[in-house]
Amino acid sequence: MLAERKKLIQSLFDEYIEMYASRDQRLAARFSQNFSGYAGSSDQLITDTDEWIKVTLLDFEQIPQRIEIEMLDLSLQDLSDDVVSATAFFHIHLPVPESFLARETARLVLIFRREDGNWMITHSGISIPFGLAERGEVYPMQRLNERNSELEALIEERTHELKIAIDELAQSHEQLLQSEKLASIGLLAAGVAHEINNPIGYVTSNLGTLNAYTRLLLDIAVELESWIGAGAPQGEALFALKQRLDDAELDYLSNDLDSLIKESRDGLERVRKIVADLKSFARLDGTELQLADINVGLDTTLNIVSNELKQKAKVVCNLGKLPQVRCNPGKINQIFMHLLLNAAQSISQFGTITITTKHQSDWVTIAVSDTGVGIPDKNIKRIFDPFFTTKPVGKGTGLGLSISWGIACDHGGRIEVDSTPGVGSTFTLYLPISGPDVAPGEALKDSRQ
Ligand SMILES: Nc1ncnc2c1ncn2[C@@H]1O[C@H](COP(=O)(O)OP(=O)(O)O)[C@@H](O)[C@H]1O
Ligand SMILES: [Mg+2]
């Protein structure tokens, strides 16, 4: 009985294949055969929920000989006679053979039994989107559209999440730079306060002395005034007046007055200069480029950090003749500050910091050398990494060199390091004279302050 049915179906297929082979593709082959009860099931038949149709996919061109599809439990109302539109109802859920994965189209051949008991065979070309095919699923158009919108919504959601993450990242980077700036400002403020306190201390003390001197001189002047009209003093009064003038040591007073005033002037000038340097140094923000004298910038920065340096090192300057460099001087000063502070901090007792500037064709180089502890090989690759520090908490943030590196890059330049543990280190900043191609900060606006 079973063999008989199989034979029938086989012949049905043979006929179908013949039709198909005769290129009558447009018209789906349709048969109404009055046989019933094909109970054999192929390995590939699957059962799923009610809505699902048991089907088998057949690559018609490759394996036309076998009946691969059986469709059961299908109500005919759902399936129009028009094969193409009928296909749209199918939701095929099958492990798709490997050979299909690389193809866009496969043949779907269906045999099903009508409600009236007749059997029907039909075929259609179907598309197997690759991704879905791998999962063994083929969706009808409608489902694909739904899936598309789902994916679009998902992408939109992910994009949004990504944007928020990027914003947060930019924000924390900004905060980081801010905190490094604050840390540097804190350090500088202490140094600058000390620098200013010193001249203010002796100017104040000089004012006290000047006050005493003028008191003395004024007292004598008042007495002399009292003699006007009364006639020149005689005898004992004259002697007493002479004694007071002797005590006042007018020669000494005159010299000392001059030097006190000069010293105080110098001190106040020093305060003025520190304040001016601080102002020019503090102009760190802004992205404007200008032609600047690098040696002057170094001098300004040295003044600002002098308090930190003088306790640790003698500073030797070999400043070459430099052309003006197109740069953002405030930011370049910031690099100098970091290099100088690092140099001072690397020296354990007392050493030497040597600053050398040179003009080399299209570049200027600024080298800061120290006689400090040096950098071990294992660290040298990491020193420019943000947060890499070998200093105790509170002393190092690990951001100085990474910020400096960023500024150098923004200027189209670079920083090179050469270090021998136990001997010292040299950091060399290379800056192109013509400056960056774009304004610094524009190129990397999002990542640099
Ligand atoms: N001149 C130097 N001599 C020795 N080590 C240095 C020198 N400059 C930088 N380093 C090393 O690089 C690390 C990172 O420097 P930096 O980014 O300025 O951060 P920080 O100074 O806050 O540690 C330092 O902790 C130190 O280990
Ligand atoms: Mg540092």
Image (spheres, rainbow, N blue to C red):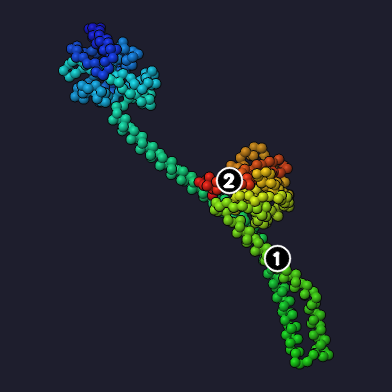
Crowd rating for badge 2 (residues with CA inside 10 Å; few <14, some 14–19, many 20+): some
Find the residue positioned furthest to the bottom.
230
Labelled pair 1, 2 in contact (Cβ < 8 Å): no
Tag shown at residue 436: 2
Relative to 157, say whether 4 is above or below: above
316 and 363: which is toward the camera: 363
50 and 178: which is toward the camera: 178
User: Which of the 4 quarters of the picture holds residue 74?
Assistant: top left
Q: How many marks do you count on the picture?
A: 2
Residue 338 position in % (x across, y down):
63, 49
Residue 232 position in % (x across, y down):
79, 90
Judge whether residue 216 can be spotted in this image.
yes
Relative to 194, say whether 318 is above or below: above
Q: Residue at x 58, y 56 (%)?
A: 283
Disc 2, SS: loop
Judge whether residue 393 can be spotted in this image.
no
User: Disc 1 residue type?
Assistant: Asp
Q: Which part of the image, by quadrant, shows the N terminus?
A: top left
Residue 61 position in % (x across, y down):
33, 14
Give left or right: position of 296 versus 148: right
Q: Residue at x 67, y 43 (%)?
A: 361
Q: Residue at x 78, y 78 (%)?
A: 248
Give left or right: position of 69 versus 312: left
Tag shown at residue 266: 1
Tag shown at residue 74: none
Give left or right: position of 234 versus 290: right
Q: Earlier in the sequence, mark 1 or mark 2?
A: 1
User: Which of the 4 quarters of the picture holds residue 46?
Assistant: top left
